[in-house]
Amino acid sequence: RDEHGRVIRNPKRHPTGEDNVTIYANATILGGQTIVGASSIVGGSVFLAQSVAPYSRVAVKPPELQLRLSRAASPSEESPQGQVSHDPHSDVDAAEE
């Protein structure tokens, strides 16, 4: 509704992609005022709700592996970074090395 209480008809609902924009799979770009600048690249699985300058690259930060060991794990199996010090898929036991 506008300042007089009237219903606004046909507002712009979709974002604008300028020339030579590449948008990869599963990217979500929201907003009628959102502009993706010329020659920009929007990576896959990006959620974008604000405008992007020309010649930009927008990507999702790669996830980081977080390993939380159970309390049953002995301290000798844990390294200072909280990662297991031996390969659990290895056929060689840590005591045999």
Image (tube, rainbow, N blue to C red):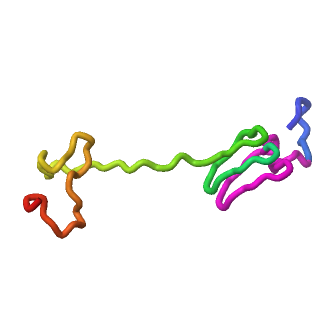
Residue at position x 66%, y 61% in the image: 25
Residue at position x 38%, y 50% in the image: 65
Magenta stretch? 10-36
In the image as oriented, which residue stretches furthest toward the top? 3
- Answer whether residue 28 is magenta in the image: yes
Task: Check the picture and name the quadrant holding the N terminus.
Answer: top right
Q: How many marks?
A: 0
Apparent side of residue 59 relative to residue 64 in the rendered image (left or right): right
Residue 41 place in picture, x, y as percent: 71, 50
Apparent side of residue 4 relative to residue 78 in the rendered image (left or right): right
In the image as oriented, which residue stretches furthest toward the left? 95
Residue 97 place in picture, x, y as percent: 11, 59
Residue at position x 91%, y 48% in the image: 10
In the image as oriented, which residue stretches furthest toward the front? 97
Q: Is the stretch drawn in magenta largely helix, strand or loop?
A: loop
Residue 44 place in picture, x, y as percent: 63, 56
Residue 21 place in picture, x, y as percent: 79, 52
Residue at position x 30%, y 50% in the image: 67
Placement of 62 over or under 87, stated as above or below: above
Apparent side of residue 81 relative to residue 55 in the rendered image (left or right): left
Query: Of 6 and 96, which appears nearest the observer?
Result: 96
- Answer whether residue 24 is magenta in the image: yes
Query: Of 38 and 30, which appears nearest the observer?
Result: 38
The quarter holding residue 51 reads top right
